[in-house]
């Protein structure tokens, strides 16, 4: 499988772009555990061209996380073109266009998945960005706006005609948000459409190695993108890769090892974010991590952990957890 000139090994796994999740620290960890391509947090094109510091900070890329795709969103052709040109200066491998974000502050304003209600504009943005930048341009989108407008099969052909290098499909409509089950049947229909020549990447509900193998085998996608299944668990990529190669589970990592990875992630986040931002950014990983699931009498400690406001407070709590809850691991 190739995107532009970049070639991937069989059964590639990609880290999905996620706001307040896929910062460079997390991308680097996921890369170490086997992610073949990582995506930045999605970046507002409008904010980028206005010079907003936070948006430009999201463009910082280190060589040890490559290959990297920068994801942009806006409902405006000019903003997307100019932002894509700025993003190219960060020297990513790929520019990705977000036509799938379902949250109200994005889709409700006509960007992200909101463009699924304005296909002419969606296609105009895509054509203009492909023409404007030298890097391969990819798209991430959904099945459609709602149950009555699942247009992805025809839309995929139209996007291919715009010149994109690959298409990622999240198997839900915008109306579903993240509820219900992702519909991989339509993803497979796009992949098996004889008119489609570009790589098709499937996304949605991949949380186990068994699911990943099943989706590769059943739907024939060129790659699988993992989003929420990686939050608090960057080692999921290694687990899936091992299962795909050996058809058996990777021996489980110890809880102490998992805990050390999470603590390392926090420490590295602190090296480029201030203390408060690093802690707030990290809470989502702590809340989602499977490390703490199933630990008896952990509720009170979990609340303390997620309410800690300083590194000193949080690492003191970590010491208690490691001594009292992970001691027998």
Image: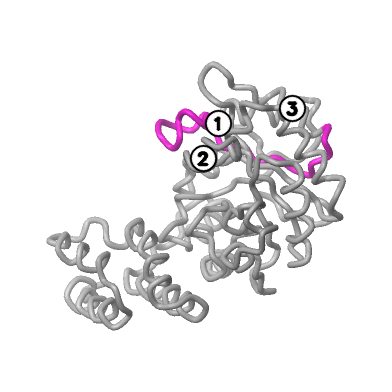
The stretch drawn in magenta includes residue 180: yes
| Badge 2 density bin: few <14, some 14–19, many ≥20, Cα 10 Å | many
**Would you place residue 163 above or below residue 270 in this image?**
above
**Contact? badges 1 and 2 (CB < 8 Å):** yes
The stretch drawn in magenta includes residue 283: no
Which colour assignment does the render follow? one colour
Disc nearest the viewer among 2 and 3: 3
**Tag of residue 3:** none
Residue drawn at (75%, 39%) of the image:
125
Marks 2 and 3, Cα distance to the nearest angstrom?
26 Å
- Asked if residue 179 lies left or right of residue 156, the reply is left
What span is colored magenta in the figure?
161-183
| Badge 1 density bin: few <14, some 14–19, many ≥20, Cα 10 Å | many
Marks 1 and 2, Cα distance to the nearest angstrom?
8 Å
User: Residue 165: horizontal and vertical position, in percent?
Assistant: 79, 44
**Would you place residue 237 above or below residue 100 in this image?**
below
Mark earlier in primary sequence (2, 3) = 3
Q: Is residue 2 visible?
A: no
Residue carrying label 3: 120
User: Residue 169: horizontal and vertical position, in percent?
Assistant: 62, 37
Residue carrying label 2: 204
- Asked if residue 278 lies left or right of residue 107, the reply is left
Q: Identify which residue, 226 or 311, lies in the foreground.
A: 311
**Would you place residue 120 above or below residue 282 in this image?**
above
Residue carrying label 1: 184
Q: Quadrant of the C terminus?
A: bottom left
Q: Is residue 54 visible?
A: yes
């Amino acid at each position: 499988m190739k995107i532009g000139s970049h070639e991937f090994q069989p059964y590639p796994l990609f880290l999905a772009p996620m706001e307040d999740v896929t910062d460079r620290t997390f991308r680097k960890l996921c890369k170490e555990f086997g992610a073949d391509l990582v995506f930045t947090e999605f970046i507002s094109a409008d904010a980028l061209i206005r010079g907003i510091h936070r948006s430009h900070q999201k463009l910082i890329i280190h060589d040890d996380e490559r290959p990297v795709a920068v994801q942009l969103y806006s409902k405006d052709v000019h903003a997307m073109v100019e932002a894509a040109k700025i993003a190219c200066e960060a020297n990513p491998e790929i520019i990705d266009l977000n036509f799938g974000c379902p949250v109200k502050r994005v889709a409700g304003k006509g960007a992200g998945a909101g463009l699924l209600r304005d296909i002419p504009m969606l296609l105009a943005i895509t054509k203009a960005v492909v023409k404007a930048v030298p890097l391969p341009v990819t798209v991430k989108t959904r099945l459609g706006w709602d149950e009555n407008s699942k247009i992805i099969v025809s839309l995929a052909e139209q996007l291919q005609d715009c010149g994109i290098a690959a298409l990622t499909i999240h198997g839900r409509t915008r109306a579903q948000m993240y509820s219900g089950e992702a519909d991989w049947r339509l993803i497979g229909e796009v992949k098996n459409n004889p008119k489609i020549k570009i790589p098709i990447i499937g996304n949605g509900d991949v949380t186990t190695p068994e699911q990943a193998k099943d989706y590769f085998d059943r739907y024939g996608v060129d790659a699988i993108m993992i989003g929420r299944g990686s939050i608090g668990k960057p080692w999921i990529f290694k687990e899936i890769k091992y299962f795909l190669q050996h058809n058996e589970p990777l021996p489980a990592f110890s809880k102490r090892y998992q805990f050390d990875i999470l603590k390392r992630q926090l420490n590295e986040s602190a090296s480029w974010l201030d203390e408060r931002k690093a802690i707030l950014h990290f809470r989502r990983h702590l809340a989602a991590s499977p490390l703490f699931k199933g630990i008896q009498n952990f509720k009170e400690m979990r609340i303390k952990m997620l309410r800690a406001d300083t590194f000193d407070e949080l690492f003191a709590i970590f010491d208690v957890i490691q001594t009292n809850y992970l001691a027998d691991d």
